[in-house]
Image (cartoon, coloured by chain):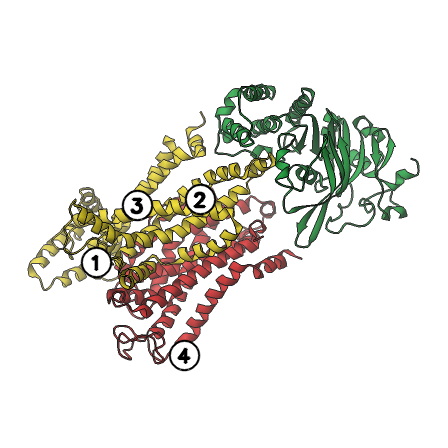
Chain colours: A red, B green, C yellow
Amino acid sequence: MSGGREILYFALRNNKLRVGVGFVLFFLILALVGPYIARYDPLDYVGPGYHPPSREYWLGTNTFGQDIFSQFVHGLRSSFLVGLLGGGIATLIGLLVGFFAGYMGGFVDELLMMFTNILIVIPTLALLIIIAAYLPYRGVLIQSVIIGFTAWPWTARAVRAQTLSLRAREFVDLARISAVPTWRIILYEIAPNMLSYVFMVFILQFGGAILAAVGLDFIGLGPTRGISLGLMLQYAVLWNAVHLGMWWWIVPPGLAITLIVGGLYLTNVGLDEAFNPRLREK
Amino acid sequence: MLEVRDLRVYYRTLKGHVQAVDGVSFSILPRETLGIAGESGCGKSTLANALVLLKPPMEYIGGKVFLGKDELPIADYDAMRRFRYRRISLIPQYAMDALNPTRKLGRIFRDLVMDLGIPFDGDLKRKLRERLEFVNLPQTVLRMYPFELSGGMRQRVVMVQASLLDPEVMFADEITSALDVSTQKAVVIMLQGFVREGFVGSLAFITHDLSVLYQIADRVLVMYAGKVAEILPCEKLIGGCRHPYTKLLLSSLPKVGLRHTEHPLVGIPGQPPALLSPPKGCRFRERCPEAFERCTEEPPLLEVGPGHLVACWGETGDA
Amino acid sequence: MGRYLGRKFFIYSLTFIFAVTINWLIPRFMPGDPIMVLISRFAGLPEATKVIHSYLTKAFQLDLPIWRQYLNFWKALLRGDLGISIYLYPKPVMEAIAEAIPYTLVVLLPAILVSWILGNGIGAIAARRRRLDSTLLPLFYILTATPYLWLGILLAWGLGVVLRAFPIAGAYGFSLQPELSLRFILDFLHHWILPFLSLCLVMLGGWAIGMRNMIIYELEANYSRYLESLGASQRLIRRYAFRNAVLPQVTGLALQLGTIVAGQVTTEVVFSYPGIGYLLLQGILNQDYFLIQGCFLFIVIGVLLANFFVDLAYVFIDPRVRYAYSGGR
């Protein structure tokens, strides 16, 4: 049994991984298919307000008579988009900064890590708020970008540590002695060894970006047009859905976020166990 | 004394059992230092660990072990607790890293002893002080944390800890491998002192380096691929060994006074067999320069001289 | 030790300077013109407009060279002048924040403390028993993935609206005034429980996971294995492992502060709890930029202080840090 097949063997038998991927896939499919089967436009006032779930309105309607199922599936889409883009950007920046700092060492390393450590201390949400508050127009795209640009520091720190340990291995030394250009060493020697690690980091950043977006939307800095799960929750609270007991308005968005992010975390742990024999479930 | 009869301890893996210790028999006599030698992966460390702490993925397959008059329940984790440390002890391969980093050394000694239900009283404290002195450590180390000591000092602390309760047998697992030659020498002399002074009943010294064994051991056990190849008195090692593997191991050593560059080392060609599904018969035969047809059968361990046992078909004719 | 804290202090000072600079930079260089927005919002209130206008020219000093603007910004800040809130006009931002801070701390600090202690305890127990571990661990992961605000909403709905056990808005009843009477204190606690719970529960999951993983890691360390080889009881081995596993959890406290603060902000919004988070929401909804900036600054200062205290505590609990920076005694 080769290394790759062994990892696959453990990956397929790992319950955490199965459950985690299951959750994520379920909502992903719902996000992709949902908007096509939803009967109404998410922002149209299509029916009576305060309507509990029924055959007509699958998840009921909100105070204004908008269809919650339609909002929900469109919101799912934007959540996945934020996760993909925001998480992707954060991973990429973290990867570049960490790689570069760890590989170059010396002054470059000192400087980059100083900057990273400064950003790590500043609470991401606070930074997001101050940036987002001054944007006259906000869309899902811009939101993802600013989340990506504020969430990378811990990734940079972790990637740097990984790079340092890989750099010390002999195959990298060998390449360096034989005068292989730096970019080739990074691309062909170091990067492949970090692939599994980077993937797991991306999963965590994906979940982190979704959570950050929900928080931002909820305090009124969400997309100025369109709909998202965080916005649904904000409106629900602003329009007293809690007092009025409109559970169909407050449960689905939060539940979806919890299960998606929880699923991502479980996937991450499951993968970690599959990659690292020491952690495997006995 | 320790007597091991036909011990089998395998590693349980996904792909099957790795036969790391497969039918090993030997004994360690009182006040004796037994050297255990072999290439890495031959099962010598597994042997020591199995006798002290046998737990998954190690699996007990068979065999008996006697310590003095008692049978050692090595497969029974809890029953073994009565024997560990008090009667059978170990200096591990990772001795430099074997102490809790956030406890002062004095506390580490006391915590463990009291945990075993032994009072940490004047006698034991006096013994501890004497032993620290014996290994050239100042008493002040007891008030220090492990990371405040050098690696060598930590190793000596572990030597003192392992022997504090005067065990009947102590295993020292590859403890000289990471040291330079002069430090090696000092550690070996200290361990010899441990046996001479009766700190430990007898010592089993495990190493891949025959030249170190030659300095310390009374008898030498050579292991190959989970089995005993040869057991012989140390003085017969040079010139008197009979197993082809032992001979090759010896010839791969640099001669005293020779510089490495002048005389290239003669390695042993080939690789030890995979212990997942080892070949039938003698496990050395594929690398053995003297192998013949009979070697496809399992060779018995036969006495070829006083205290000299060999597992090789090449010997059966003469003996 | 002095060197260690000196280094940390240096980094935190830089962070503070950085945060203040961001605070100064963003209103000036973001697209759009926040100052115009500010003034236009008060077009209907001639008197306020005049004050705001004169204030803005003073605060932003757009006629001065950039470096002077920056310098003056710092000067005002060091005097404790964060501008005047528009939403709470004419209350200075500093005053509004000073009123809100106690409410934030009274929820935040107990929630952190209780969740940290409970979480570490539960995590350590989970690491001990395999069956418990396999049921508890997924639960912890779900808990830590729950947005604070949603758990808050659920608790408000379940315990507040359905069961009518707790009030779900404000820090005390409308009919009461803050005073040192039993009636007020009980009412205050009654309002306090739900925000506290929602914050505490989500954090609990994170701490428990961290502790469980750290203990398992420590139990596989060489020193644990050696103790086992010498016949030590599981009790002793676990005691050592627990002690060593707690240390990184203290660092975790500092690392998690950012997300915890985010949780606090959104939780206050859910329960209309009059802390910094609620103030921030008002600032955002009313485009009260001075208020937003002031809140940002105070959150950063709070997190910096907390970080520094954690570093300080670390010197006392981890002998390795003490040793590494004392140059060996």
Which numbered tag is attached to residue C109?
Answer: 3
| Tag 1 subunit | C
Q: Considering only order in the chain, which callout, 1 or 3, is on the residue closer to the N terminus?
A: 3
Res. B195 image quadrant: top right
Q: CA distance from mark 4 to mark 3?
A: 47 Å
| Tag 4 subunit | A
Q: Of circles 3 and 1, which is in front? A: 3
Q: Of circles 4 and 3, which is in front? A: 3
Which numbered tag is attached to residue A109?
Answer: 2
Which numbered tag is attached to residue A37?
Answer: 4
Residue B301 position in % (x across, y down): 84, 38
Is any part of residue B56 visible from this angle? Answer: yes
Res. A46 image quadrant: bottom left
Q: On the image, numbered disc 1 is attached to which residue? A: C282
Instruction: Identify the image quadrant of the N terminus of chain C.
Output: top left
Instruction: Identify the image quadrant of the C terminus of chain C.
Output: top left
For the residue marked with disc 4, what is the amino acid? Ile
Q: CA distance from mark 3 to mark 1?
A: 23 Å
Q: CA distance from mark 1 to mark 4?
A: 38 Å
For the residue marked with disc 3, what is the amino acid? Leu
Seen from the viewer's position, the closer of residues B152 and B73 is: B73
In the image, what residue occupies the spot 30% across and 59% down? C159
Mark 3 closeness class: few <14, some 14–19, many ≥20 residues within 10 Å = few
Res. C312 image quadrant: top left
CB of mark 4 within 8 Å of CB of mark 3?
Answer: no
